[in-house]
Image (spheres, helix red, strand yellow):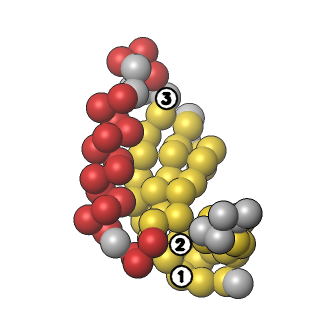
């Protein structure tokens, strides 16, 4: 299924290296997860890793537990 949704993106050295689907398109929940991730990030890695909440057009799939996951990001919405 292809859908526009909110995702927490992990950007390493300028390119997207990881992503997490945020249910119910909740920007507030995404920002909360971003703050937690930034707090847990090693000081040595703060220049290399950044987190960003963004609307993306993505191909979603259901995992073995029935939860939606991002399979592939088609494009980031501006």
Left or right of 35 on screen, residue 1: right
| Mark identifier at residue 4 | 1
Q: Quadrant of the C terminus?
A: bottom left
Q: Name the secondary structure under disc 1.
A: strand
What x and y, as percent, mark residue 7?
48, 64
Q: Residues within 10 Å of mark 1 (few under 14, many from 20)?
A: some
Q: Name the secondary structure under disc 3.
A: loop
Q: Residues within 10 Å of mark 2 (few under 14, many from 20)?
A: many
What residue is shown at x 46% (from left), y 57% (from top)?
8
Q: What's the CA distance linking mark 2 and mark 3? A: 22 Å
Q: What's the CA distance linking mark 2 and mark 1? A: 5 Å
Q: Quadrant of the N terminus?
A: bottom right
Q: Earlier in the sequence, mark 1 or mark 3?
A: 1
The answer to whether residue 70 of the structure is visible from this angle is: no
Of discs 2 and 3, which sits in the foreground?
Answer: 2
Q: Earlier in the sequence, mark 2 or mark 1?
A: 1
| Mark identifier at residue 62 | none
Per the image, the residue denoted by label 3 is 48
- Say if mark 1 contacts mark 3, CB within 8 Å: no
What residue is shown at x 29% (from left), y 56% (from top)?
31
Examine the rendered structure and indicate whether residue 1 appears above or below residue 46: below
What x and y, as percent, mark residue 51?
42, 46
Q: Name the secondary structure under disc 2.
A: strand
- Say if mark 2 contacts mark 1, CB within 8 Å: yes
What residue is shown at x 31% (from left), y 68% (from top)?
27
Q: Earlier in the sequence, mark 2 or mark 3?
A: 3
Examine the rendered structure and indicate whether residue 12 appears above or below residue 44: below
Per the image, the residue denoted by label 2 is 56
């Amino acid at each position: 299924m292809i859908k526009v949704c909110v995702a927490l993106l992990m950007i390493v050295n300028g390119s997207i290296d990881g992503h997490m689907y945020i249910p119910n398109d909740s920007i507030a929940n995404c920002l909360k997860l971003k703050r937690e991730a930034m707090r847990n990030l090693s000081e040595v890695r703060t220049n290399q890793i950044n987190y960003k909440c963004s609307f993306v057009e993505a191909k979603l799939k259901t995992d073995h537990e029935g939860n939606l996951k991002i399979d592939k990001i088609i494009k980031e919405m501006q």
